[in-house]
Image (cartoon, rainbow, N blue to C red):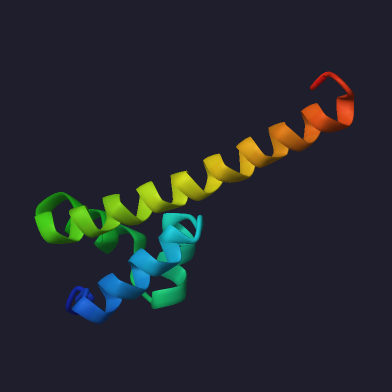
Amino acid sequence: MGRKPVISPVHITKLAAIISRCNTIKTACDATGIPVRTFYDRLHRDLHFSQAIAHARAKARQSLIKVVKEAAITDLACSGLDT
């Protein structure tokens, strides 16, 4: 068996950036060449890594909530019920 892939600080930065743009963990792993299993192993044993990913996921949620709120305002304005 080969060595497990290493998640370097550069990988962490790239993973966090991809996730913060509302991409899935799998997409981020595929884009950086990190196996999903390695990602989750590291997530459970490395506080710095888990904090970086949690921050990225929070940014993604904020972006998604903003989109939903803007769509709701647009839908309400289009419905004529906003008056």
Q: Position of residue 26 (x, y in %)?
A: 45, 59
Q: How far across and down, in percent of the image, does residue 80 sit?
A: 89, 23
Q: Quadrant of residue 13?
A: bottom left
Q: Position of residue 72 (x, y in %)?
A: 70, 32
Residue closest to the eye, 70 or 59 = 70
Can you tell which quarter of the image residue 28 is in? bottom left
Q: Quadrant of residue 10?
A: bottom left
- Determine whether, in the image, residue 68 is placed left or right of residue 44: right
Quarter holding the N terminus is bottom left
Viewer-side residue, 24 vs 81? 81
Looking at the rendering, in which quadrant would you find the C terminus?
Answer: top right
Residue 38 seen from this side = yes
Question: In front here: 76 or 15?
Answer: 76
Residue at 34 percent of width and 65 percent of height: 16
Q: Identify the residue at horizontal 10%, vertical 54% (top origin).
A: 47
Q: Is residue 58 left or right of residue 9?
A: right
Is residue 8 visible to us here? no
Position of residue 3 relative to residue 40, above or below, is below
**Residue positioned 49% across, 61% down in the render:** 21
Decide: is 6 above or below 53: below
Q: Residue at x 56, y 44 (%)?
A: 66
Q: Residue furthest front?
A: 83
Q: How many marks?
A: 0
